[in-house]
Image (tube, grey):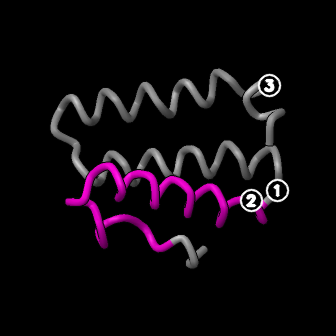
Amino acid sequence: MEQVGLYDTDKLINCSTTEQNALANGGGCPAYDNFITCLSNVYTGYCGPDIRLYICSLEVDGITGADKTCAGKLQDCTKP
């Protein structure tokens, strides 16, 4: 997983930049959901499909902890 930060930095930055721009334009929970998908795709591309559940769950838990209004509105990480 550490390799992603070393070798796919541009993709991670793109995920974050896209999220921040969407949030600044009132994107709300869908912006977070797109961010989760973006990160999952980056990590899956490098680490394989088994990493998706971990990355998705980690992000959903973090986001709903920080923004309670998104609880129950983000993707279900157990579904492909």
Residue drawn at 18 percent across, 32 percent down: 25
Tag 2: residue type?
A: Ile
The picture places residue 71, in percent across and down from the top left corner, at: 29, 67
Tell me how far mark 1 sits from mark 2, CA to CA: 6 Å
Query: Relative to residue 27, is residue 31 drawn left or right?
Result: right
Q: Is the magenta stretch mostly helix, strand or loop?
A: helix
Q: In this view, does 23 lie above or below 7?
A: below
Q: Quadrant of residue 68?
A: bottom left
Label annotation for residue 33: none
Q: Do the residues labelled 1 and 2 touch (CB within 8 Å)?
A: yes
Q: Quadrant of residue 1?
A: top right
Q: In which quarter of the image is residue 42?
A: top right
Tell me how far mark 3 sits from mark 1, CA to CA: 15 Å
Tag 1: residue type?
A: Gly
15 vs 55, nearest the viewer: 55
58 part of magenta stretch:
yes
Residue drawn at 73 percent across, 29 percent down: 5
Tag 3: residue type?
A: Tyr
Highlighted magenta segment, given as a residue range: 49-76
Q: Name the residue under label 1.
A: 48
Label annotation for residue 51: 2
Q: Residues within 10 Å of mark 1 (few under 14, many from 20)?
A: few
